Amino acid sequence: MKQETLKKVSYSILVGPSVLLYASFMIFPVIACFTLSFTNWAGQGFGEWWASGQGEVGKQLFVGLTNYLTALKDPVFLHGLRNNIAVVGISVLGQIPVGFVLAYIIHRKLVRFENFFTAMIFLPITISAVVVALLWQQIFSPVGLYTTFVRMITGNPRYVLQIFENKTFAILPVLFVILWMYTGIYLIIFLANLQKINPSIIEAAIIDGASEGQILFKIIIPSMLNVIFTTMIFAISGSLTSFDLIWAMTGGGPAHYTEVIAIYMYVNTFKYYKYGFGAAVSMIIVILSVGLISLLQAIFKKFEAQYE
Protein backbone atom coordinates (compact mmCIF):
# COMPACT_ATOMS: atom_id res chain seq x y z
CA MET A 1 0.00 0.00 0.00
CA LYS A 2 2.82 2.34 0.84
CA GLN A 3 4.50 1.51 -2.45
CA GLU A 4 1.30 2.30 -4.36
CA THR A 5 0.98 5.60 -2.53
CA LEU A 6 4.61 6.37 -3.32
CA LYS A 7 3.96 5.65 -7.00
CA LYS A 8 0.96 7.98 -7.04
CA VAL A 9 2.97 10.73 -5.38
CA SER A 10 5.83 10.19 -7.83
CA TYR A 11 3.46 10.35 -10.80
CA SER A 12 1.88 13.50 -9.42
CA ILE A 13 5.28 15.16 -9.01
CA LEU A 14 6.30 14.20 -12.54
CA VAL A 15 3.02 15.03 -14.27
CA GLY A 16 1.90 17.92 -12.05
CA PRO A 17 4.14 20.66 -13.52
CA SER A 18 3.14 19.74 -17.08
CA VAL A 19 -0.55 19.76 -16.19
CA LEU A 20 -0.13 23.10 -14.44
CA LEU A 21 1.62 24.62 -17.45
CA TYR A 22 -1.02 23.22 -19.81
CA ALA A 23 -3.81 24.60 -17.65
CA SER A 24 -2.09 27.99 -17.40
CA PHE A 25 -1.41 28.43 -21.10
CA MET A 26 -4.26 26.44 -22.68
CA ILE A 27 -7.26 25.79 -20.45
CA PHE A 28 -7.38 29.11 -18.58
CA PRO A 29 -7.01 31.28 -21.74
CA VAL A 30 -9.87 29.38 -23.42
CA ILE A 31 -12.13 29.86 -20.39
CA ALA A 32 -11.11 33.52 -20.12
CA CYS A 33 -11.74 34.06 -23.84
CA PHE A 34 -15.16 32.42 -23.58
CA THR A 35 -16.09 34.66 -20.64
CA LEU A 36 -14.70 37.74 -22.35
CA SER A 37 -16.80 37.06 -25.47
CA PHE A 38 -19.95 38.05 -23.54
CA THR A 39 -18.61 41.52 -22.72
CA ASN A 40 -17.79 44.73 -24.56
CA TRP A 41 -14.44 45.11 -22.81
CA ALA A 42 -12.19 47.54 -24.69
CA GLY A 43 -8.91 46.49 -23.10
CA GLN A 44 -8.94 49.13 -20.36
CA GLY A 45 -8.98 48.34 -16.66
CA PHE A 46 -7.41 44.93 -16.16
CA GLY A 47 -9.55 42.72 -13.97
CA GLU A 48 -12.85 44.43 -14.79
CA TRP A 49 -13.81 42.51 -17.92
CA TRP A 50 -15.64 39.78 -15.96
CA ALA A 51 -17.50 42.22 -13.73
CA SER A 52 -21.09 43.25 -14.20
CA GLY A 53 -22.21 46.82 -13.80
CA GLN A 54 -20.59 49.93 -15.23
CA GLY A 55 -17.12 49.86 -16.78
CA GLU A 56 -14.58 52.66 -16.90
CA VAL A 57 -16.14 54.17 -20.01
CA GLY A 58 -19.60 54.12 -18.49
CA LYS A 59 -20.95 51.23 -20.57
CA GLN A 60 -22.43 47.94 -19.51
CA LEU A 61 -19.67 45.31 -19.68
CA PHE A 62 -21.90 42.24 -19.97
CA VAL A 63 -23.66 42.22 -23.35
CA GLY A 64 -24.78 38.59 -23.62
CA LEU A 65 -24.86 37.19 -27.16
CA THR A 66 -24.61 40.62 -28.80
CA ASN A 67 -21.04 40.07 -30.02
CA TYR A 68 -21.92 36.75 -31.63
CA LEU A 69 -25.04 38.11 -33.32
CA THR A 70 -23.18 41.20 -34.55
CA ALA A 71 -20.48 39.04 -36.13
CA LEU A 72 -22.95 36.69 -37.80
CA LYS A 73 -24.81 39.66 -39.31
CA ASP A 74 -21.68 41.44 -40.54
CA PRO A 75 -21.14 41.01 -44.33
CA VAL A 76 -17.38 41.34 -43.84
CA PHE A 77 -17.39 38.43 -41.37
CA LEU A 78 -19.57 36.32 -43.66
CA HIS A 79 -17.24 36.97 -46.59
CA GLY A 80 -14.29 36.05 -44.37
CA LEU A 81 -16.12 32.84 -43.42
CA ARG A 82 -16.59 32.08 -47.11
CA ASN A 83 -12.88 32.60 -47.69
CA ASN A 84 -12.07 30.34 -44.74
CA ILE A 85 -14.26 27.60 -46.18
CA ALA A 86 -12.33 27.98 -49.44
CA VAL A 87 -9.04 27.65 -47.52
CA VAL A 88 -10.34 24.53 -45.75
CA GLY A 89 -11.41 23.16 -49.14
CA ILE A 90 -8.02 23.72 -50.79
CA SER A 91 -6.31 22.16 -47.77
CA VAL A 92 -8.50 19.07 -47.42
CA LEU A 93 -9.32 18.53 -51.11
CA GLY A 94 -6.07 19.94 -52.52
CA GLN A 95 -3.03 19.62 -50.27
CA ILE A 96 -3.88 16.20 -48.84
CA PRO A 97 -4.82 14.40 -52.11
CA VAL A 98 -1.92 15.98 -54.02
CA GLY A 99 0.49 15.20 -51.19
CA PHE A 100 -0.77 11.62 -51.03
CA VAL A 101 -0.54 11.05 -54.79
CA LEU A 102 2.97 12.51 -54.94
CA ALA A 103 4.05 10.41 -51.95
CA TYR A 104 2.60 7.29 -53.57
CA ILE A 105 4.37 7.99 -56.87
CA ILE A 106 7.68 8.53 -55.09
CA HIS A 107 7.25 5.53 -52.79
CA ARG A 108 6.40 3.17 -55.65
CA LYS A 109 9.34 4.63 -57.63
CA LEU A 110 7.10 5.51 -60.56
CA VAL A 111 9.34 8.50 -61.30
CA ARG A 112 13.11 8.94 -61.42
CA PHE A 113 15.08 11.27 -59.13
CA GLU A 114 12.56 10.79 -56.32
CA ASN A 115 14.88 12.33 -53.72
CA PHE A 116 15.21 15.49 -55.78
CA PHE A 117 11.45 15.83 -56.27
CA THR A 118 10.81 15.17 -52.57
CA ALA A 119 13.22 17.94 -51.59
CA MET A 120 11.79 20.41 -54.12
CA ILE A 121 8.18 19.81 -53.06
CA PHE A 122 9.07 20.12 -49.38
CA LEU A 123 11.27 23.20 -49.89
CA PRO A 124 8.50 25.89 -49.68
CA ILE A 125 7.56 24.95 -46.11
CA THR A 126 11.14 25.57 -44.98
CA ILE A 127 10.83 29.22 -46.04
CA SER A 128 9.24 31.80 -43.75
CA ALA A 129 5.56 32.42 -44.50
CA VAL A 130 6.24 36.16 -44.65
CA VAL A 131 8.99 35.66 -47.23
CA VAL A 132 6.73 33.41 -49.30
CA ALA A 133 3.91 35.96 -49.06
CA LEU A 134 6.12 38.84 -50.20
CA LEU A 135 7.52 36.74 -53.04
CA TRP A 136 4.11 35.86 -54.44
CA GLN A 137 2.85 39.38 -53.76
CA GLN A 138 5.46 40.63 -56.21
CA ILE A 139 4.61 37.90 -58.73
CA PHE A 140 0.88 38.74 -58.66
CA SER A 141 1.30 42.53 -58.52
CA PRO A 142 -0.06 44.58 -61.49
CA VAL A 143 3.51 45.00 -62.79
CA GLY A 144 4.78 41.64 -61.51
CA LEU A 145 6.10 38.52 -63.15
CA TYR A 146 2.68 37.05 -63.96
CA THR A 147 1.54 40.19 -65.79
CA THR A 148 4.85 40.39 -67.68
CA PHE A 149 4.63 36.72 -68.69
CA VAL A 150 1.05 37.04 -69.97
CA ARG A 151 2.01 40.16 -71.93
CA MET A 152 4.82 38.22 -73.61
CA ILE A 153 2.57 35.26 -74.45
CA THR A 154 -0.43 37.24 -75.69
CA GLY A 155 1.42 40.19 -77.18
CA ASN A 156 -0.91 42.55 -75.33
CA PRO A 157 1.22 45.28 -73.65
CA ARG A 158 -1.83 46.65 -71.81
CA TYR A 159 -2.71 43.46 -69.95
CA VAL A 160 -2.82 43.86 -66.15
CA LEU A 161 -3.78 41.16 -63.64
CA GLN A 162 -7.07 42.34 -62.12
CA ILE A 163 -8.21 39.28 -60.21
CA PHE A 164 -7.77 41.05 -56.85
CA GLU A 165 -10.42 43.56 -57.93
CA ASN A 166 -13.00 40.79 -58.18
CA LYS A 167 -14.68 40.08 -54.83
CA THR A 168 -15.51 36.48 -55.76
CA PHE A 169 -12.17 35.40 -57.23
CA ALA A 170 -9.67 37.57 -55.31
CA ILE A 171 -8.97 34.68 -52.94
CA LEU A 172 -7.83 32.34 -55.76
CA PRO A 173 -4.16 33.49 -55.90
CA VAL A 174 -3.99 33.12 -52.11
CA LEU A 175 -5.40 29.59 -52.36
CA PHE A 176 -2.79 28.73 -54.98
CA VAL A 177 0.02 29.93 -52.71
CA ILE A 178 -1.40 27.95 -49.76
CA LEU A 179 -1.54 24.82 -51.94
CA TRP A 180 2.02 25.39 -53.20
CA MET A 181 3.48 26.06 -49.76
CA TYR A 182 1.92 23.39 -47.55
CA THR A 183 1.57 20.34 -49.81
CA GLY A 184 5.12 19.31 -48.92
CA ILE A 185 4.15 18.70 -45.29
CA TYR A 186 1.59 16.08 -46.27
CA LEU A 187 3.98 14.56 -48.80
CA ILE A 188 6.49 13.87 -46.01
CA ILE A 189 3.81 12.57 -43.61
CA PHE A 190 2.38 10.17 -46.17
CA LEU A 191 5.79 9.10 -47.45
CA ALA A 192 6.95 8.26 -43.93
CA ASN A 193 3.84 6.15 -43.29
CA LEU A 194 3.95 4.45 -46.69
CA GLN A 195 7.41 3.20 -45.81
CA LYS A 196 5.94 1.47 -42.74
CA ILE A 197 3.74 -0.79 -44.89
CA ASN A 198 5.24 -4.27 -45.22
CA PRO A 199 6.64 -4.55 -48.78
CA SER A 200 5.94 -8.30 -48.82
CA ILE A 201 2.19 -7.56 -48.80
CA ILE A 202 2.49 -5.48 -51.97
CA GLU A 203 4.81 -8.05 -53.56
CA ALA A 204 2.30 -10.81 -52.83
CA ALA A 205 -0.48 -8.72 -54.37
CA ILE A 206 1.61 -8.17 -57.53
CA ILE A 207 2.30 -11.91 -57.79
CA ASP A 208 -1.45 -12.54 -57.51
CA GLY A 209 -1.95 -10.20 -60.48
CA ALA A 210 -3.17 -7.08 -58.67
CA SER A 211 -3.06 -3.88 -60.72
CA GLU A 212 -1.59 -0.60 -59.48
CA GLY A 213 -5.12 0.67 -58.82
CA GLN A 214 -6.04 -2.41 -56.81
CA ILE A 215 -2.86 -2.09 -54.74
CA LEU A 216 -3.71 1.54 -54.04
CA PHE A 217 -7.38 1.10 -53.11
CA LYS A 218 -7.28 -2.36 -51.52
CA ILE A 219 -3.99 -2.21 -49.61
CA ILE A 220 -2.50 1.28 -49.35
CA ILE A 221 -5.55 3.44 -48.57
CA PRO A 222 -7.07 1.06 -45.95
CA SER A 223 -3.67 0.98 -44.22
CA MET A 224 -3.47 4.78 -44.26
CA LEU A 225 -6.98 5.68 -43.06
CA ASN A 226 -5.89 6.81 -39.60
CA VAL A 227 -3.07 8.89 -41.06
CA ILE A 228 -5.42 10.51 -43.58
CA PHE A 229 -7.88 11.29 -40.79
CA THR A 230 -5.13 12.89 -38.68
CA THR A 231 -3.87 15.02 -41.58
CA MET A 232 -7.41 16.21 -42.25
CA ILE A 233 -7.71 17.34 -38.62
CA PHE A 234 -4.45 19.27 -38.99
CA ALA A 235 -5.67 20.78 -42.26
CA ILE A 236 -9.03 21.91 -40.86
CA SER A 237 -7.66 23.39 -37.64
CA GLY A 238 -4.80 25.09 -39.46
CA SER A 239 -7.02 26.47 -42.21
CA LEU A 240 -9.51 28.04 -39.81
CA THR A 241 -6.68 29.85 -38.03
CA SER A 242 -4.84 30.95 -41.20
CA PHE A 243 -3.34 34.37 -40.65
CA ASP A 244 0.35 35.08 -41.26
CA LEU A 245 0.60 34.15 -44.95
CA ILE A 246 -2.59 35.97 -45.97
CA TRP A 247 -1.88 38.98 -43.76
CA ALA A 248 1.61 39.44 -45.21
CA MET A 249 0.47 38.82 -48.78
CA THR A 250 -2.69 40.94 -49.02
CA GLY A 251 -3.51 42.26 -45.55
CA GLY A 252 -7.02 40.97 -46.18
CA GLY A 253 -7.49 43.51 -48.94
CA PRO A 254 -8.41 45.00 -51.18
CA ALA A 255 -11.70 46.00 -49.55
CA HIS A 256 -11.73 42.84 -47.35
CA TYR A 257 -11.85 40.64 -50.49
CA THR A 258 -9.15 38.23 -49.23
CA GLU A 259 -9.90 38.59 -45.54
CA VAL A 260 -10.38 35.48 -43.40
CA ILE A 261 -11.89 35.18 -39.93
CA ALA A 262 -8.53 35.33 -38.13
CA ILE A 263 -7.68 38.64 -39.83
CA TYR A 264 -11.17 39.94 -39.08
CA MET A 265 -10.66 39.04 -35.42
CA TYR A 266 -7.19 40.61 -35.32
CA VAL A 267 -8.31 43.90 -36.87
CA ASN A 268 -11.32 44.28 -34.60
CA THR A 269 -9.35 43.35 -31.49
CA PHE A 270 -6.11 45.26 -31.90
CA LYS A 271 -7.06 48.06 -34.28
CA TYR A 272 -10.51 48.96 -32.94
CA TYR A 273 -9.89 47.69 -29.37
CA LYS A 274 -13.01 45.51 -29.39
CA TYR A 275 -11.57 42.76 -27.22
CA GLY A 276 -14.91 41.27 -26.27
CA PHE A 277 -16.00 41.15 -29.90
CA GLY A 278 -12.67 39.64 -30.95
CA ALA A 279 -13.04 36.96 -28.28
CA ALA A 280 -16.49 36.10 -29.64
CA VAL A 281 -15.06 35.72 -33.15
CA SER A 282 -12.31 33.44 -31.81
CA MET A 283 -14.93 31.28 -30.08
CA ILE A 284 -16.79 31.01 -33.38
CA ILE A 285 -13.56 29.67 -34.90
CA VAL A 286 -13.35 27.10 -32.08
CA ILE A 287 -16.97 26.05 -32.62
CA LEU A 288 -16.40 25.68 -36.37
CA SER A 289 -13.26 23.61 -35.77
CA VAL A 290 -14.98 21.28 -33.32
CA GLY A 291 -18.02 20.95 -35.59
CA LEU A 292 -16.05 20.14 -38.74
CA ILE A 293 -13.73 17.71 -36.96
CA SER A 294 -16.72 15.94 -35.34
CA LEU A 295 -18.37 15.63 -38.76
CA LEU A 296 -15.14 14.30 -40.21
CA GLN A 297 -14.86 11.76 -37.42
CA ALA A 298 -18.40 10.50 -38.11
CA ILE A 299 -17.61 10.12 -41.82
CA PHE A 300 -14.39 8.23 -41.13
CA LYS A 301 -16.15 5.80 -38.82
CA LYS A 302 -18.32 4.78 -41.78
CA PHE A 303 -15.23 4.34 -43.95
CA GLU A 304 -13.55 2.20 -41.30
CA ALA A 305 -16.66 0.04 -41.05
CA GLN A 306 -16.53 -0.62 -44.81
CA TYR A 307 -12.90 -1.76 -44.69
CA GLU A 308 -13.29 -4.01 -41.65
Image (cartoon, helix red, strand yellow):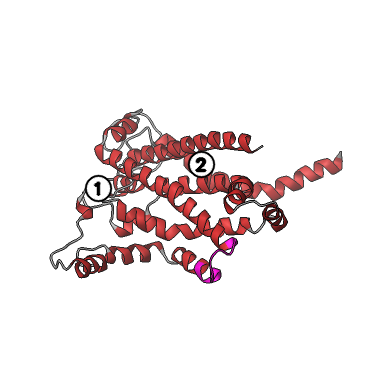
User: x and y percent of residue 299 in the render?
Assistant: 53, 35
Quadrant of the rendering where the C terminus is positioned: top right
Residue 302: image quadrant is top right
Crowding at dot 1, Cα within 10 Å, few <14 / some 14-19 / many 20+, comes out as some
Q: Let me know if residue 115 is in the magenta part.
A: yes
25 relative to 83 in the view: left or right: right
The mark lying in front, picked from 2 and 1, is 1
The magenta stretch is 107-117
Q: Is residue 124 visible?
A: yes
Relative height, residue 267 to residue 157 (above, below): above
Amino acid identity at mark 1: His
148 relative to 110 in the view: left or right: left
Q: Residue at x 26, y 68 (%)?
A: 145
Q: Is residue 31 visible?
A: no
116 relative to 177 in the view: left or right: right
Residue behind mark 2: 28
Q: Residue at x 74, y 46 (%)?
A: 11
**How many numbered marks, from 0 up?**
2
Give residue 256's mark: 1
Q: Residue furthest front?
A: 209
Q: Let me know if residue 196 is in the magenta part.
A: no
| Label 2 vs 1, first from the N-terminus | 2
Q: Residue at x 33, y 55 (%)?
A: 174
